[in-house]
Amino acid sequence: MRKNRKFIIAGLVLVVAMGILFYTALGSAFDSYQTVSEFKSDIVYDEYVSIKGHVVEGSLEFNAEDESYLFEISDKDNQEDFIPVVHNGALPDSFEEGGGVTVKGELETTGVFHTEELLVECPSKYEQEKAQSGE
């Protein structure tokens, strides 16, 4: 009976350890994101979040002083409700105004979102959408 108990305990420890390892290794693959309107309906400050939106046309500015980019993101169908975003460092090659992005980072109490990661939608995805809509 003692041997069975040891095997059960060892098995449970192994399963828990593997679960933790699996979650740690693949956790970022399961990150969920919010749209701009979802985020704005329940704003959280100074907490790491992922927000998916589109770069507002004409909003991109470069700050040479600290080598950062400032732009706004919104839901594709509502560009009047936006979030100002600051990104330090180079922009991805496929970044463009009007294009889809996912920003990961924190919203400061000033109302400006600071990115830790900036992902750009695959250009073929929104080029295909434009072709289907006749643009």
Image: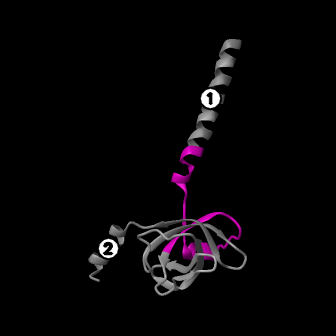
Dot 1 crowding, Cα within 10 Å, few <14, some 14–19, many 20+? few
Residue 105, compared with residue 65, is above or below; it is above
Q: Is residue 78 left or right of residue 112?
A: left
Q: Residue at x 48, y 87 (%)?
A: 58
**Residue 78 at x, y = what percent?**
49, 84
Residue furthest front in the image: 65
**Residue 75 at x, y = what percent?**
49, 78
Quadrant of the rendered image containing residue 40: bottom right
**Residue 102 at x, y = what percent?**
51, 68
**Type of residue at label 2?**
Glu
Q: Residue at x 63, y 34 (%)?
A: 17
Residue tagged 2 = 127
- State how far apart marks 1 and 2 are (Cα): 47 Å
Q: Can the viewer see residue 131?
A: yes
Q: Which mark is residue 14?
A: 1
**Type of residue at label 1?**
Leu
Q: Can the viewer see residue 1?
A: no
Q: Earlier in the sequence, mark 1 or mark 2?
A: 1
Q: Quadrant of the C terminus?
A: bottom left
Q: Residue at x 32, y 68 (%)?
A: 124
Looking at the rendered structure, the number of numbered marks drawn on it comes to 2
Residue 46, compared with residue 63, is above or below; it is above
**Residue 73 at x, y = what percent?**
53, 78
Q: Which residues are magenta?
A: 24-53
Q: Is residue 110 left or right of residue 99?
A: right
Circle 1: element type: helix
Circle 2: element type: helix
Dot 2 crowding, Cα within 10 Å, few <14, some 14–19, many 20+? few
Q: Quadrant of the N terminus?
A: top right
